[in-house]
Amino acid sequence: MFFRSRSPSPANSPLRSRANTPTSSPHRTFNDSLMEENIEVAQSLFDRWESNNAASLFTGDRQEARQYLHTVKDLQSAMHHFIAQTSASEKLIKAQNLMETAMKRLQKEFYQILSSNRQYLDPESVSSHSSRASTISSLSDFEDEVEDEFRVTTESISEVERVSMAAMTDLKSIADCMISAGYAKECVKVYKTIRKSIVDEGLYHLGVEKMTFSQIQKTEWDVMEIKIKSWLNAVRVAVKTLFYGERILCDHVFSSSETIRESCFSEMCGEGAIMLFGFPELVAKSKKSMEKMFRTLDLYQAISDLWPEIDSIFNYHSTSAVRSLAVNSLLRLGEAVRTMLTDFESAIQKDSSKTPVPSGGIHPLTRYVMNYISFLGEYSEILSDIVADWPLAVQTPLPESYFGSLDTDPEGTSSISVRLAWLILVLLCKLDGKAELYKDVSLAYIFLANNLQYVVAKVRSSNLKFLLGDEWVAKHEAKVKQYVSNYERVGWSKVFSALPENPTADITPEQARNIFNKLILSFEEAYRKQTTWVVPDQKLRDEIKVSVAKKLVTPYRQYYEMHRSALMRLCGSDSLVRYAPENINNFLSDLFFGVGSVGSFPSSSTSPPSSTHSRVKRGH
């Protein structure tokens, strides 16, 4: 690179003293003549453009701009030639002054292109055609090919892309020329000033703001949740469009110098990126609560998904702080999630409600925990990363019967599958304890069947089905059937025991009446008690009714038909009609909607509830 001087050397400088020393070769060579001609051509061209200061080199005929840049290159060759002979010749000083003029002109042109093409050089436009820009950039040493490539390429693109690519090509040409001439500082200053304002403005419009830890701690969660949502939208645009586009443009314009590219991009985007990625780390450090779990996971997932782009865009040494901050945010967010999972498990175990759920329905704890866990299942991939190196530690003893439901080391099962299965296990153990609050054992089994059925349904209808597997589902469905079987055995034992062992056996009318009275009394007792109970799940409700009906109505019908005449004489037609087998079925169909009242018993006109009535009373 040639010696760069801003003004003629003073009379007492070494440069001027060397110019006064007679040279030993006063005759001019061919190269001298050629270099002198380069200076004269530059003088003529630069003077012409300076006389028309308002004109722009890079609008209209692009041939003029190419000629100007060629002339600057030739002038630089002349300066190299003359400085090799003497560092203080008049020709060198003249050439230096001309170079100053040319650089001021190019600096002005550089500024004008950046300013007037802001809308065409927005990061989104730049990133959308970066491959084309790279193609043209690769031909930068062969201007004729560049011009042809540019012409062919722009024939098939939109006007916005055409103008954008033209501006990028011109900016690169000017930057290459100024850097080669030793005027990189002036070029970079203009670029940083304009493009940093675009970055800052872009982040502002995306809603990115600088917040301190104290501010985040004092912000109400509902307000903070809005800010997190805004950040989640902003970070994707900022990384994939704003920072990526600026990196593409910066790399293209300053492709001739890696040092300049790094310095320029770092100063333009580093501060904004630090502000952007500082936010999730502060959120992670703030007070933990279970309601913050899913937004914390959203923050983690956003950074995790964008990490390849972050690592690529900010791969300079001077932007390592951005990468470190993004990684540290992931670590902090992961720690926060693990803390909240621990608190969630602890909250389940510490639930101390002692009031039985009316009618044996779904416990609020079951609804809350399963809704929470099913949402966690939607984040299984991210959660697997977070808990991969966090072994499950069983701190509270659970009944031995439950351990078979959880394989703590299943081949091919992710760590999050095991952990979610464990959380469900903790819930089921807690529900076992709450079932003991019911004085009626059969109602306790209805409660357990209802709640386990709700758990299984939640698993089946969510991503948990794929995480826990068919075997888990089948095992717990079998457990529901076991609870139902226990309910039938306890809740209908008196009724079933009142049925004759052989319904069609030949017995006396008096024996038939005694069996009938005992059977009806036990049925009324069971019905009055169970009519207020509820089974919200329609499928489970129907299965229970069908199962009870098979065990009760079928043998009862055989007995009823066999002894109808004797019962008519001894019990009367009213009682016989009221307790006909079809009405027993009707009575059973009224159960488990939670609409009856203790002590009431339907008349013979009772019929199964209508579909509308059923939908209103079932609930979930």
Image: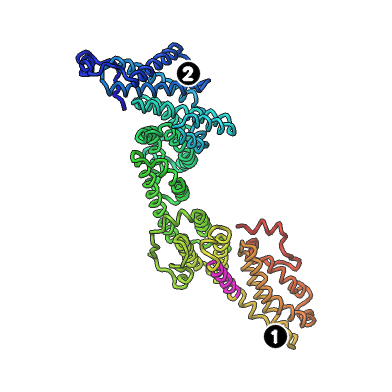
Q: Residues within 10 Å of mark 2 (few under 14, many from 20)?
A: some
Q: Residue at x 74, y 80 (%)?
A: 558
What residue does disc 1 label?
502
Q: Quadrant of residue 338?
A: bottom left
Q: Quadrant of residue 571?
A: bottom right
Quarter of the rendering occupied by the C terminus: bottom right
For discs 2 and 1, the disc positioned in front in the rendered view: 2
Alpha carbon separation for disc pair 2 and 1: 112 Å
Q: Amino acid at mark 2?
A: Ser
Q: Is residue 196 above or below residue 103?
A: below
Residue 222 visible somewhere in the drawing: no
Q: Is residue 71 above or below residue 394?
A: above
What residue does disc 2 label?
56
In the image, the segment drawn in magenta is: 472-488
Across and down, in percent, residue 394 comes to 39, 65
579 or 195, which is in the foreground?
195
